[in-house]
Amino acid sequence: MHLHPVNVMSGAILLLASLGCAAPFQTQLSPGNSFTATPTAIQTSYNSKSNQPTTKTDTITVEGEKIPITLKLYDQYSNLFTTYFPDGEFIAEGGSSGEGTGVRFIANFGGNKNENAYVHVAFLNNVKTLEQVKSFVNGKNGLIASNKWRVVDRSQKVPYPWAKEKIVFSKGKNIVGTIYLGQQKGKVFYVITHFPVEYGDGFPPRADLILKNIQVSG
């Protein structure tokens, strides 16, 4: 069944008008407004569903310095995907509705939660093909236009096996980010990174840990 982008995005525009232009989680997740965010539970052992360790370690390089990072498993929606995120440096908030499922990993550097710095993963129930994801993101009333983001660059050369296209965007002088269009194991989705420019050294390598650990469920 063909999906009409205008119909898909009409609800998102209404939602944007009611909540302002701050790119709220609900706007990014879906065209509906019935989404409810719920916090995740802390995992303390091997997960019985995915048989993945609940924590592991990795290393990032920031300004030439190698920094060890403890990663925590995120598997609240393991029927869709799992990933790992830097423990203590991000807060995971996920939710699901009839429109779809989305998760935000919000920066919490130094215990200071910043809603403008996040990685957002979204699976929409009525978006079934990569072309439909592209329409949802790029359409006249799509995700980019709704949030007043300016496209800086597009590339199909991306380092993650699930990602088919990378779109670099900015908003004003203070916000930058990327949108990844994803397709793997019969599922399509999109991922956003969004952060203030002053986070430019520390945020991208930490976001990369989340992105490179995404595993889409079959």
Image (spheres, helix red, strand yellow):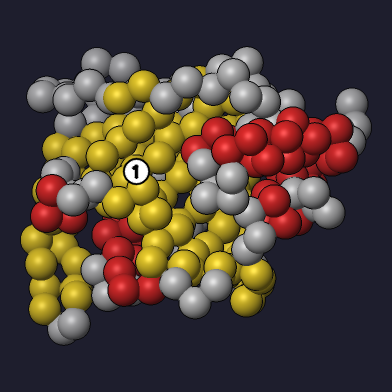
Q: Nearer the viewer, residue 123 or 197?
A: 197
Residue 26 visible: yes
Q: Residue at x 73, y 26 (%)?
A: 126
Res. 164 image quadrant: bottom right
Whether 182 is drawn above or below 39: the answer is: below
Apparent side of residue 179 relative to residue 111 in the rendered image (left or right): right
User: For the residue marked with disc 1, what is the amino acid?
Assistant: Phe
- Rendering coords of residue 119 (x, y %): 41, 50
Q: Nearer the viewer, residue 203 or 166?
A: 203
Read off the residue under disc 1. 105
- Rendering coords of residue 217 (x, y %): 48, 30
Apparent side of residue 195 relative to residue 14 in the rendered image (left or right): left
Q: Residue at x 27, y 75 (%)?
A: 201
Residue 188 visible: no
Whether 64 is drawn above or below 53: the answer is: below
> For the N terminus, which image quadrant?
top right
Res. 12 image quadrant: top right
Q: Name the residue at the bottom extreme.
A: 64
- Rendering coords of residue 50 (x, y %): 31, 24
Apparent side of residue 1 relative to residue 29 in the rendered image (left or right): right
Q: Nearer the viewer, residue 100 or 20?
A: 20
Q: Residue at x 80, y 49 (%)?
A: 141
- Rendering coords of residue 179 (x, y %): 57, 57
Whether 119 is drawn above or below 55: the answer is: below
SS at mark 1 in the image: strand
Q: Residue at x 35, y 60 (%)?
A: 208
